[in-house]
Image (cartoon, helix red, strand yellow):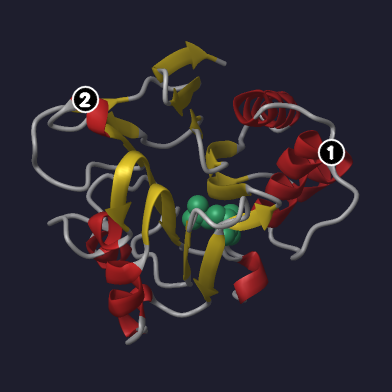
């Protein structure tokens, strides 16, 4: 299983998701605490953020362990945004280890990360093509097909997860996505947490597991959708 995290709120750096917190994604890549499947997340990492000049995110993905990238700490200190997403990957057996299989996947302003596994024949029915043969790439492609059909972020995630979940009851479908102004996530088979910040108006963290020991982390119930926007955070059953 992979681990992923996102921030929506007052601008902050990518390092605030990856390097600075005691249990940030760097540490979660080699010592996750709550991961239900797999032990380390050493098959790649990806980060994405919005620089304000364009609607499309800036993205950086690599198919190597996050701790081996000498350049990432500097990039993460400089990348500052009100909407950030990062992930570390543990490839499911049989899936390719390559940049095109590494979340976050991108389409227009949307970024999508997947923590879990799904039968590819099920999700292939929901998209025409994907950038990799990896199951996560097909899930992202299914979400992007709904973006192109005009669906909002949360609805697209909910539709893809419930449709694939019905056809593949063993699927694990924790998706995390953002579009620059909102963050959406599903809890379907693995852990998911939210933190409203020391000053709730600052913004919200959504992560597979808490990034630090601060009070205020709340476990998201299984089979729910989290939707964070400037209006607040809503959690609803799927
Ligand atoms: N199935 C996906 C992959 O192979 C995600 C794996 C995971 O969540 N560990 O990359």
The residue lying furthest to the top in this view is 237
224 with respect to 93 (left or right): left
What residue lies at 62% left-to-right and 50% top-to-bottom? Answer: 55
**Looking at the picture, how far across and down is residue 147, in whole percent?**
75, 37
What residue is at 72 percent from the left and 32 percent from the top? Answer: 164
Query: Of 187 and 235, which appears nearest the observer?
Result: 235
Name the image quarter holding residue 143.
Answer: top right
- Looking at the rendered image, the quarter that the C terminus falls into is top right
As rendered, which of 148 and 133 lies closer to the eye? Answer: 148
* Residue 20 in picture, x, y percent from top left: 17, 61
Whole-Å distance between the Cαs marked 2 and 1?
A: 37 Å
Task: Decide: is 112 above or below 20.
Answer: above
Horizontal arrangement in the rendering, residue 16 relative to residue 39 (left or right)? left
Q: Which image quarter: residue 68?
A: bottom left
- Whether residue 96 is visible, yes or no, is no
Query: What mark, if any, has residue 126 been given in the picture?
Result: 1
Picture disc at residue 67? none
Circle 1: is it few (<14), some (14-19), or many (20+) Cα within 10 Å? some
Q: Is residue 22 visible?
A: yes
Residue 149, given in percent of the width and then of the height, sits at 84, 32
* Residue 38 horizontal side relative to residue 182, left or right: left
Could you tell me which residue is drawn at 29 percent across and 78 percent down? 74
Q: Is residue 84 above or below residue 131?
A: above
Q: Is residue 101 above or below residue 84?
A: below
**Ligand 1, image quadrant it occupies:** bottom right
Give the percent coordinates (x, y) of residue 129.
87, 55
Residue under label 2, please give it. 200
* Element type where label 2 sits in the image: helix
Measuring 53% from the left and 41% from the top, which residue is drawn there? 178
Foreground of the two, 138 or 176: 176
Q: Of marks 2 and 1, which one's residue comes earlier in the chain?
A: 1
Looking at the image, do the residues carrying marks 2 and 1 touch, with CB atoms under 8 Å apart? no
């Amino acid at each position: 299983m992979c681990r992923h995290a996102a921030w929506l709120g007052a601008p902050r750096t990518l390092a605030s998701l990856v390097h600075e917190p005691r249990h940030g994604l760097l540490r979660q890549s080699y010592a996750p605490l709550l991961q239900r499947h797999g032990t380390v997340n050493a098959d790649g990492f990806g980060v994405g953020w919005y620089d304000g000049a364009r609607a499309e995110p800036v993205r950086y993905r690599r198919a190597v362990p996050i701790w081996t990238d000498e350049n990432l700490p500097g990039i993460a200190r400089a990348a500052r945004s009100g909407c950030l997403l990062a992930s570390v990957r543990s490839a499911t057996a049989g899936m390719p280890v390559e940049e095109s299989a590494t979340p976050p996947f991108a389409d227009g302003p949307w970024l999508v990360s997947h923590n879990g596994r799904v039968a590819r024949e099920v999700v292939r029915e929901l998209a025409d093509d994907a950038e990799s043969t990896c199951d996560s790439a097909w899930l992202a492609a299914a979400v992007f097909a709904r973006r192109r059909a005009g669906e909002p972020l949360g609805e697209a995630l909910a539709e893809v997860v419930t449709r694939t979940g019905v056809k593949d009851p063993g699927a694990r479908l924790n998706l995390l996505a953002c579009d620059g102004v909102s963050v959406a996530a599903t809890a379907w088979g693995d852990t998911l947490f939210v933190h409203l910040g020391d000053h709730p108006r600052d913004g919200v963290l959504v992560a597979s597991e808490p990034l630090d020991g601060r009070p205020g982390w709340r476990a998201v119930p299984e089979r729910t959708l989290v939707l964070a926007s400037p209006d607040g955070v809503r959690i609803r059953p799927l």
